[in-house]
Image: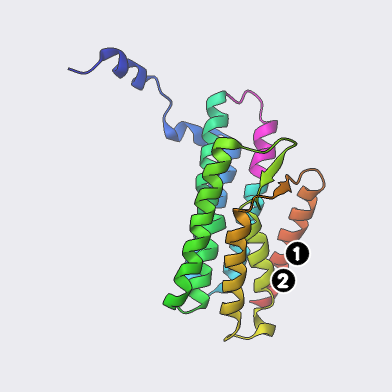
Amino acid sequence: MGDPSGDVAASQLPSAVSFVRDWANLLTLTGLACGVTAIFLAIRGEYHAAMIALLWALFCDWFDGPIARRTANRTEDDRAFGGQLDSLVDIVCSAAAPATILLCVADLNAWFLPGAFLLLISGALRLAHFNIFGLRDGGDYCGLPIDTNIIVVTAVFAFRGSIGESVFPWVLYGVVVLLAALGLGPFKTPKLVGGWYYAITAYVIGMTGFYALAV
């Protein structure tokens, strides 16, 4: 027979859906929707629209934290759940989505699979390491934070037309491999706060306008 006390304890656990009431978690899930949309649009070959979706995934990733910190009466369970949810969404938006975009611009060329794998492996290791060890003393990341992938990929993609359709996939390949390596680097990267939130907002809005006009 089962342990009755265990059954009672399990019945008192909050449901996963109960955490959706949290505004920060809602924004995180909105970012997930943006990341999945970016993957969908890339598969359809609508790259400019995919970049816009990816940019707003970045925006959600940056601002779910400040909203969480400003939410009153947030419990320890809320904070723990939000942290885990954020990492799971990051692997989709900042690793799976850029990896899919790389494969799509290369017309699913098998030679590009290693680059996609490297970015996903780097992202998974990077996030697992952060979840266990967090920031270094002084509030520094170890290696590049994973959302750097979105910033760099959306910036590099703006030059696709001038680089050329045949060469650009290889340029993006090199960028993706470099990002994968830097994400696992032993160096310190300071956590960007304060005015950087305005900079990210300006970048997201500005690049959204650029890609919207380029559609």
Q: Callout 2, which amino acid?
A: Phe
Task: Relative to 119, say whether 105 is above or below.
Answer: below
Front position in the image: 133 or 204: 133
Among all residues in the image, which is located at the extreme top? Answer: 5
User: Which dot marks residue 206?
Assistant: 1
Residue 67 x, y percent position in the rendering: 67, 37
Q: Is 137 left, or right, of 15 in this rendering?
A: right
Q: Which residues are magenta?
A: 63-75
Q: Secondary structure at mark 1?
A: helix
User: Which dot marks residue 176?
Assistant: none
Residue 182 belongs to the span the image colors magenta: no
Residue 135 appears anywhere in the view: yes
Residue 202 x, y percent position in the rendering: 77, 58
Residue 108 appears anywhere in the view: no
Q: Secondary structure at mark 2?
A: helix
Crowd class of label 1 (few under 14; some 14 to 19; many from 20; radius 10 Å):
few
Q: Residue at x 79, y 51 (%)?
A: 198
Residue 70 belongs to the span the image colors magenta: yes
The image quadrant that residue 35 belongs to is bottom right
Residue under numbered circle 2: 210
Task: Relative to 122, say whether 29 is above or below.
Answer: above
Residue 172 x, y percent position in the rendering: 60, 73
